[in-house]
Image (spheres, helix red, strand yellow):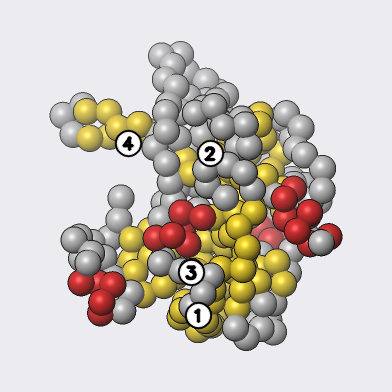
Amino acid sequence: MHQRTWLRALASLAVCSFLTSHPVEVRAEPACLEPAQLAHAGVRIARYFDDAERAVQDDGTVGIQGSGWFLTPTAIVTIAHVVTAMNLTAEEWKAIEIRDGDRTWPARARIKQLVGRGADKLVVLELQAAIPAARSLTVRAAPLVPDERVVTLAFTAGRARFVSGRFVHYGDERGAADGAMLEMYDGNDRLAVDYGASGAPVFDCDGRVAAVVAGVLTQTLSLGRDLRVSTAWGMPNVLSVPVQGLRIMLQQ
């Protein structure tokens, strides 16, 4: 799903889904962090293509957007498929836009490091100049445990959205051992984490980043019209990448 003549909102993998015919009561426990505690914790990142890059786009796309977060004032973490779609490289500085609420910063960025062993790695983007107002986040050292509560601040549909849920297990539905599977929802909305959320930080209840959103699990049903649905209640619906590799990088 994308906007054909403006920004294509990146996120996700439509991997698989699990359906049930039995109604499930929506859990209504409050999030373990308040939205105000995560103010300025996640940012939207966007890149607008130059004329040469636009010429090779067959769908009229003029740019790409995703989510990310500051590791330091000169480093932003996001996910590999966002960076690939933006045509960012390790060799060349390219213009990007960073947005945090009403604040927008033009910046120049390049790939500093790829982190992880899975198909969709974490990417640390180096900024040519520091963002003095950046809120640098703390990386969690320990793995998540089953049913541990988590929250995320992701940019979906161009706006920041606070979503809570739980960690389910490590290992994704495609057999990749490095994925961290989450169940995330906002009330009845199981697509609260959706297109544009790739690269968003996933926090534990102490406000430390434990994982990074990589994709959502959906399928499309044909019921007279195409209907995109999430997985069933009680099942994971968001694929993320653990951040322990970032801890190792910071210690080097």
**Drawn side of residue 61 relative to residue 238, left or right:** left
Q: Position of residue 204 (x, y in %)?
A: 74, 47
Q: Mark 2: which amino acid?
A: Val
First in sequence: mark 2 or mark 4? 4
Query: What residue sits 64% from the left and 54% below the top?
Result: 115
Q: Position of residue 137 (x, y in %)?
A: 74, 63
Q: Position of residue 67 (x, y in %)?
A: 52, 61
| Label 4 CA crowd tier, 10 Å (few <14, some 14–19, many 20+) | few
Which mark is on residue 238?
A: 2
Alpha-carbon distance for marks 1 and 2? 32 Å
Camera-near label (1 vs 4) is: 1
Q: Mark 3: which amino acid?
A: Thr
Q: Mark 1: which amino acid?
A: Trp
Q: Which residue is mark 4?
A: 228
Q: Are marks 4 and 3 in contact (CB under 8 Å)?
A: no
Alpha-carbon distance for marks 1 and 4? 37 Å
Q: Position of residue 80 (x, y in %)?
A: 51, 55
Q: Nearer the viewer, residue 163 or 42?
A: 42
| Label 2 CA crowd tier, 10 Å (few <14, some 14–19, many 20+) | many
Query: What residue sits 44% from the left and 22% below the top?
Result: 18
Alpha-carbon distance for marks 3 and 1? 8 Å
Q: Which residue is mark 3?
A: 89
Q: Mark 4: which amino acid?
A: Arg
Residue at disc 1, secondary structure: loop
Camera-near label (4 vs 3) is: 3
Q: Which residue is mark 1?
A: 93
Residue at disc 3, secondary structure: loop
